Image (tube, rainbow, N blue to C red):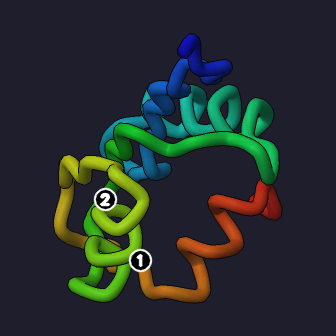
Amino acid sequence: MAESRTAPVNLIVFQTDRKSLVTGRYAEKAFARISDKTLVTHCFASGFSSEAQDIICANNGKVYSLFSNVIWGEEQLFRFKNGEF
């Protein structure tokens, strides 16, 4: 039996960082594509709290931390996944 399945979206997000202005530009482009139906399979960001990492892992996502100066909490992650950023 064939399954009707949507291909996962590999979303790459860079958190704005004063030392890396290019990453901020890519963040704007990535955020513009987020919707409530987006499956976040890969997140690149400044840093995630353990709760945020648990949420991503529960949704079969992967977390890659580029910087450690910003911590994403649960509220920010839910807003991010719902396209509110």
Examine the rendered structure and indicate whether residue 80 appears above or below residue 39: below
The residue lying toward the viewer, choosing from 12 and 55, is: 55
Residue under the image location 50 percent in, 44 percent down? 40
Residue furthest out toward the front: 1
Residue that sits furthest to the top in the current view: 2
Label 2 SS: loop
Question: Which residue is rendered at x = 54% and y = 26% of the image?
Answer: 9
**Do the residues bearing badges 2 and 1 touch, measured as CB atoms within 8 Å?**
yes
Q: Position of residue 29 (x, y in %)?
A: 68, 27
Compare residues 40 and 7 and report the one nearer the observer: 7
Q: Position of residue 31 (x, y in %)?
A: 70, 41
Q: Amino acid at mark 1?
A: Trp
Q: Residues within 10 Å of mark 1 (few under 14, many from 20)?
A: some
> What distance separates the C-alpha of mark 2 from that of mark 1?
8 Å
Quadrant of the frame with the N terminus: top right
Residue 38 located left or right of residue 68: right
Q: Closer to the camera, 76 or 78?
A: 78
Q: Is residue 57 left or right of 85 when viewed as pictured?
A: left
Residue under the image location 57 percent in, 38 percent down = 27
Residue under circle 2?
46
Identity, as a three-letter code, of the amino acid under mark 2: Ser
Viewer-side residue, 70 vs 17: 70
Vertical arrangement, residue 79 with respect to residue 18, above or below: below
Instruction: Tell me where residue 48 sits by quadrant.
Output: bottom left
Estimate the x, y position of residue 20 in percent, counting from the top left.
35, 37
Task: Give whichever of discs 2 and 1 has the lower sequence position.
Answer: 2
Q: Residue at x 58, y 20 (%)?
A: 3
**Residue 32, x across and y down, in percent:** 79, 35
The residue to which callout 1 is attached is: 72
Looking at the image, how many numbered discs can be counted on the residues?
Answer: 2
Q: Is residue 33 left or right of residue 22?
A: right
